[in-house]
Image (cartoon, rainbow, N blue to C red):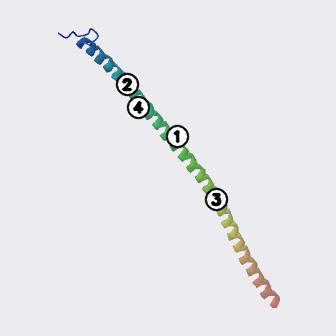
Amino acid sequence: MVAIPPTEPTMTDAIKKLDGLSTSVDNLTTSIDKLTTSVDNLMTRVDARSKSKCVDNLTTDFDKFKDRFSQRHQETKRLVQLAFTLIAIANIAVIVTSVLRR
């Protein structure tokens, strides 16, 4: 007869090990769920920050455009004033020349 050494695992030992493994898997699942939630929260924050940065960049670009538009508008006004002044001077020169010729 072959004697079974007393250190061999029994069915009860296997069930205890399986229960322990099941508990470990449950703990790991809980940890993974927490990590998933944390990653989702971080993604939301990153999206909000990138959107905020994008809005800040657009605001800066719009301010630059507004300044350039204002400068162009002033330059156009000055150019129109100069043109009308030259036309007025030319008319005055024609009138003065025709008056002095008489």
Looking at the image, which residue is at 74% across and 80% down? 90
Task: Say which residue label 2 marks.
Answer: 28
Give the mark, 4 or 3, whose residue is nearer the N terminus. 4
Q: Residues within 10 Å of mark 4 (few under 14, many from 20)?
A: few
Residue 41 on image: x %, y %: 45, 33
Give the mark, 1 or 4, whose residue is nearer the N terminus. 4
Secondary element under disc 3, as helix, strand or loop, is helix
Q: Is residue 61 above or below residue 91?
A: above
Foreground of the two, 6 or 96 = 6
Give the mark, 3 or 1, whose residue is nearer the N terminus. 1
The amino acid pointed to by label 1 is: Arg
Q: Is residue 18 above or below residue 78?
A: above
Looking at the image, which residue is at 34% across and 23% down? 25
Residue 81 on image: x %, y %: 70, 69
Foreground of the two, 66 or 92 = 66
Task: Say which residue label 1 marks.
Answer: 49
Give the mark, 2 or 1, whose residue is nearer the N terminus. 2
Secondary element under disc 1, as helix, strand or loop, is helix
Closer to us: mark 2 or mark 1? 2
The amino acid pointed to by label 2 is: Leu
User: Mark 4 and mark 1 in contact (Cβ < 8 Å)?
Assistant: no
Task: Say which residue label 3 marks.
Answer: 68
Give the mark, 2 or 3, whose residue is nearer the N terminus. 2
Q: Quadrant of residue 67?
A: bottom right
